[in-house]
Amino acid sequence: MLFHMSIAADDPKHVASVIAELWDGAVMPFPPVSDNGWIALSGDERGTALEVYPQGTVLRESEGDVDAHGEPSGRDRFTATHGAIATSLAQDAVLAIAEREGWPAKYRKRGGLFGVIELWIEGRQMMEVLTP
């Protein structure tokens, strides 16, 4: 079971807002790692969440009895990190949101076993979206 994960974005607040829209959830500031961190909350029974940090932020271990911290890395904009999220929206609604945002999206079959919408957040971060 997954409670939360994090991704990076050029516009963390906007990306968190769109994810919250897909979930019919909420968005709020989330500054523990970054002053410009945001979190999308699904509102489900598990409290599933997606943290969104500024592009280039990496997590680092902190010395002593303090939380890990985020810092800019200046690394490549693309990443192997991705997730699969569920939405109660129909495929057409998800594709309409992607079109509105200018984010590439398409329906794909994974190994002939199941279908997902590949949603490319800001054209660089893949998120698989599963509809009912």
Image: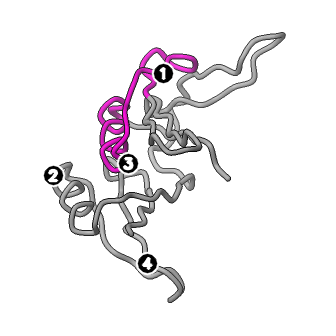
Q: Work out whether mark 4 precedes mark 1 in sequence or the reverse, and give the earlier one.
A: 1
> Disc 4, disc 1: CB below 8 Å?
no
Mark linked to residue 100: 2
> Disc 4, disc 3: CB below 8 Å?
no
Task: Single out the mark in the foreground, 4 or 3.
Answer: 3
Mark linked to residue 23: 3
Residue 59, image x and y in percent? 64, 29
The amino acid on which the numbered mark 1 sits, given as a three-letter code, is Phe
Q: Work out whether mark 4 precedes mark 2 in sequence or the reverse, and give the earlier one.
A: 2
Residue located at (43% from left, 66% from top)? 130
Rounded to the nearest whole Å, what is the CA distance between mark 2 and mark 1?
A: 25 Å
Q: Work out whether mark 4 precedes mark 3 in sequence or the reverse, and give the earlier one.
A: 3
Residue 131, image x and y in percent? 38, 67
Q: Is residue 33 magenta?
A: yes
The residue at which mark 4 appears reads as 115
Residue located at (43% from left, 51% from top)? 125
Residue 20, image x and y in percent? 36, 41
> Disc 4, disc 2: CB below 8 Å?
no
Rounded to the nearest whole Å, what is the CA distance between mark 4 and mark 1?
A: 32 Å
Rounded to the nearest whole Å, what is the CA distance between mark 4 and mark 2?
A: 22 Å
The residue at which mark 1 appears reads as 30
Q: Crowding at label 1, few (<14), some or many (≥20) Cα neighbours within 10 Å?
A: some
Q: What residue span does the magenta drawing correspond to?
A: 10-38
Q: Crowding at label 3, few (<14), some or many (≥20) Cα neighbours within 10 Å?
A: many
The amino acid on which the numbered mark 4 sits, given as a three-letter code, is Gly
Q: Crowding at label 2, few (<14), some or many (≥20) Cα neighbours within 10 Å?
A: few
Residue 15, image x and y in percent? 34, 39
Task: Note whether 19 is above or below 40 in the view shown.
Answer: below
Q: Is residue 34 magenta?
A: yes
